[in-house]
Image (cartoon, helix red, strand yellow):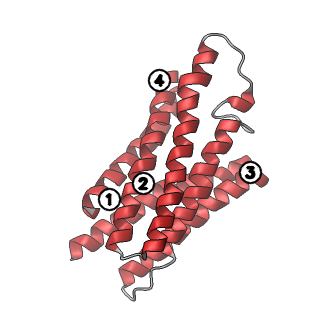
Amino acid sequence: MEKKFSVIGIIVCVLYFLSVGLFLATGTSPALTVWELMTVISGPVVLLTLLGFARYLSIPDIQEKLMLVFMGCTCALTGAAHIVNITVTRRLMAEGIDVPAYYQIGQWPSVEMAVDYLAWGFFAGLAFLVIGLPIRDANRSKKVFKITSLICSVLCLVGFFGAVFINENLWYAAPMGYGLGFIVLCVMVLTMKNRE
């Protein structure tokens, strides 16, 4: 099961980054919709994949439950932010209604961006933290997994706190954690499973 979710996690993350690239290249509304839907889909995929990792690595029940809570918050918050943007904010703008920038995705400061930063910066960062911290195994691969998970956590949290309190551009540390770092974790679990 861990192998399947690792492969699905890699595919979804790659599709997410491709959707980001598509939007940056075209700047079109359909490309933005694809990006937002990929963001909403990514939450549950990351949650299920991390759950598989927790079980594979024999993470204690309390940390597994905490991860589920934190990633559940990520899924709920990012889903709310992006679905509201797709179904309300952008629809109002298409009808010619002047929606203030502080209610738009992609603007800062903005209510929807703050919710999304909270989801993928703060709560995803905590999820990676509670998955990585309890690993005590002397196995080299599991130690590297622990370090990588903690790096993912730090990048997410730096992105969140940096964007909120210092400079919005610090946010870009977070996608390195929940995106690229997550792909690395998936590859590591695939490698460990293949060795077995």
Q: Earlier in the sequence, mark 3 or mark 2?
A: 2
Checking the image for residue 164, the label placed there is 3
- Residue 102 image position (x, y, % from top left): 74, 32
- Residue 24 image position (x, y, % from top left): 54, 33
Q: Disc 2 versus disc 4: distance between alpha carbons? A: 24 Å
| In this rendering, position of residue 71 left or right of residue 51 | right
Q: Earlier in the sequence, mark 1 or mark 2?
A: 1
Checking the image for residue 6, the label placed there is 1
Is 34 or 27 nearer to us in this picture? 34
Do residues under tags 3 and 1 come within 8 Å of each other at their CB atoms? no
- SS for dot 4: helix
Q: Disc 3 versus disc 2: distance between alpha carbons? A: 24 Å
Q: Nearer the viewer, mark 2 or mark 4?
A: 2
Of the 4 image quadrants, the one containing the C terminus is: bottom left
Q: Earlier in the sequence, mark 4 or mark 1?
A: 1
Looking at numbered disc 2 in the image, what kind of residue is underneath it? Val
Q: Residue at x 63, y 50 (%)?
A: 118
| In this rendering, position of residue 129 left or right of residue 141 | right
Q: Residue at x 57, y 61 (%)?
A: 125
Q: Earlier in the sequence, mark 2 or mark 4?
A: 4
- SS for dot 3: helix
The residue most toward the bottom is 138
Name the image quarter holding residue 188. bottom left
Q: Disc 1 versus disc 2: distance between alpha carbons? A: 9 Å
Q: Which residue is mark 2?
A: 46
Above or below: residue 148 compared with residue 108: below
Q: Residue at x 74, y 51 (%)?
A: 164
Checking the image for residue 61, the label placed there is none
Name the image quarter holding residue 159. bottom right
